[in-house]
Amino acid sequence: MNNSAIGVFDSGVGGLTCVKELRRLLPNENIVYLGDTARVPYGTRSKETIARYTKEDMEFLRSHDVKMILVACGTASSVIMSDPEFRDHSTGPAYSGVVLPAAHAACAATRNNKIGVIATGATIKSGSYGKVIRSINHNMRVVGKACPMFVPLVENGYTDKDCPPTRYFAEEYLECMKQEGVDTLILGCTHYPHLAELISDIMGSGVTLISSSAELAKLALKDLTFADELSDRQEPGSLELYCTDSTELFSENVERFLGSGINAKIEKCSLKIKS
Amino acid sequence: MNNSAIGVFDSGVGGLTCVKELRRLLPNENIVYLGDTARVPYGTRSKETIARYTKEDMEFLRSHDVKMILVACGTASSVIMSDPEFRDHSTGPAYSGVVLPAAHAACAATRNNKIGVIATGATIKSGSYGKVIRSINHNMRVVGKACPMFVPLVENGYTDKDCPPTRYFAEEYLECMKQEGVDTLILGCTHYPHLAELISDIMGSGVTLISSSAELAKLALKDLTFADELSDRQEPGSLELYCTDSTELFSENVERFLGSGINAKIEKCSLKIKS
């Protein structure tokens, strides 16, 4: 039993889709969330810069005495997988990213062994999903596609399945997935579940969508259960949300992602910057 | 006479539209440019964060012994106008932003005293253009409109006037300008000149477009001439371009903004971060 909080971070507000799922699966756990809104987005930056930002985000969560860290950002999850500096799990709480649980879910779901991955430029460039999927089953065919316009569209609220520009970009990005005949598609960026209805409409009902943020929440439940580190709290867990830019802009998005009327502390914080 | 370089900065690559104009007007001047590509965009952030980033950018240029600083970012230019910390011009080289020269050019161009301003959310929220324009002529009517999708569209190369999603957003954003009957429209973000053809197509030939980056370059020429600080160099000036994220991503955009085959030094730099 461990009553410390679960730490979650993302470059911005996309990771709140993971928080939503966590609160459904683990309603009695305390959650501390960090959105690095002063430096969002990560997905268009270099791997060195993403690794530096990720280290600073993790250090912030560690200073809040969390029992585990969930990297609810597809870009950060992908970059740290190939960075030796992140291999040492011996100091501080364990961390998990979205790539492994989403890859496992996709391998379990596919019937024709053709899996598509849509994500940010940095995630696709890292090849993270392909490496993990092929390590699970080397017969899998993996098709990756960077979707650079999806994050700004979601951040600005253009998520309706009939919104013409969003549909234009989605059709452009998903064309290769239809041509390759994938039957399973990983939403490799935690912003993308907001476009699930549109993506499903374009891909058709025969294609299974895997939400990387939901799979990460499921992994947290599994890991805490296995390690006997679930909280024994009887009342609903608390929710602390931190952002690195103003809370005004952040709060609007929190409401959009988690719904209005949530009982959460929202605060601006400073990170220890290593320049 | 002063042979020191002109310092120019922007959140990213938008300010290169000002550099392009500077090199046309002042071909013998050395230019040092900083694009804060590790933290772009600025226009969606709070004024406190934008002010902090702007201070760090200016400090970097000062350390390069520049004779003047051009704030080739509409967002930074707008935020520092109302920040008392930026009022002291006595230390270091003088700086100029895009707001004043663009506002003066618009007031000179309008015939019906109705001026439109399109820019980032932070710029529109600051009310910077309206304040300056009404201080020049209090009879002016100013219509402002935030265009949050324009920067990602430009950064991702969707600038063609017939590109359906770009046209969709431009028509949405410019609708109020047409309804108000503005005859002059300020492109208040240095990314927007890349959409000039499309914007002009929607607004019609009767509407004058004011490029804030071109007006800033003209102001630099005027100020240096007036202060007798033009270079007496006979050969073409040098161009040093710095960015805070990888040069790989930056170089692609430099080529797109300044054309291929430019003779420039491109380097990654670190800023002194005040966390």
Image (tube, coloured by chain):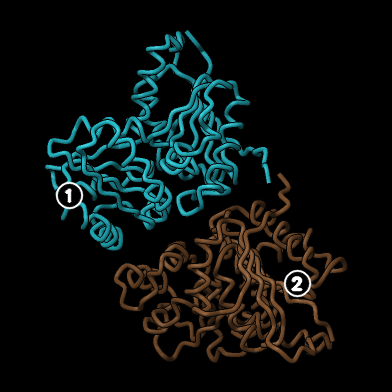
Chain colours: A cyan, B brown
Q: Which mark is residue A203?
A: 1
Residue A106, by quadrant, is top left
Question: Which numbered tag is attached to residue B95?
Answer: 2
Task: Inspect the image, locate mark 2, and give the three-letter code of the amino acid beneath it.
Answer: Tyr
On screen, residue B27 above or below B133: below
Question: Which chain does tag 1 point to?
Answer: A
Label 2 secondary element: strand
Position of B228 relative to A222 (above/below) = below
Query: In which image quadrant can residue B60 be found?
Result: bottom right
Residue drawn at x 46%, y 39% is A82
User: Callout 2: few (<14), some (14-19), or many (20+) C-alpha neighbours within 10 Å?
Assistant: some
Question: What chain letter is assigned to the residue under label 2?
Answer: B
Q: Amino acid at mark 1?
A: Met
Residue B12 sits in quarter: bottom right
Relative to A162, is A21 on the left or the right? right
In this rendered view, identify the residue nearer to me: A267 or B183: A267
User: How many numbered badges does the structure rendering display?
Assistant: 2
What x and y, as percent, mark residue A110? 17, 36
Residue B74 image offset from top left, x and y in percent: 60, 69
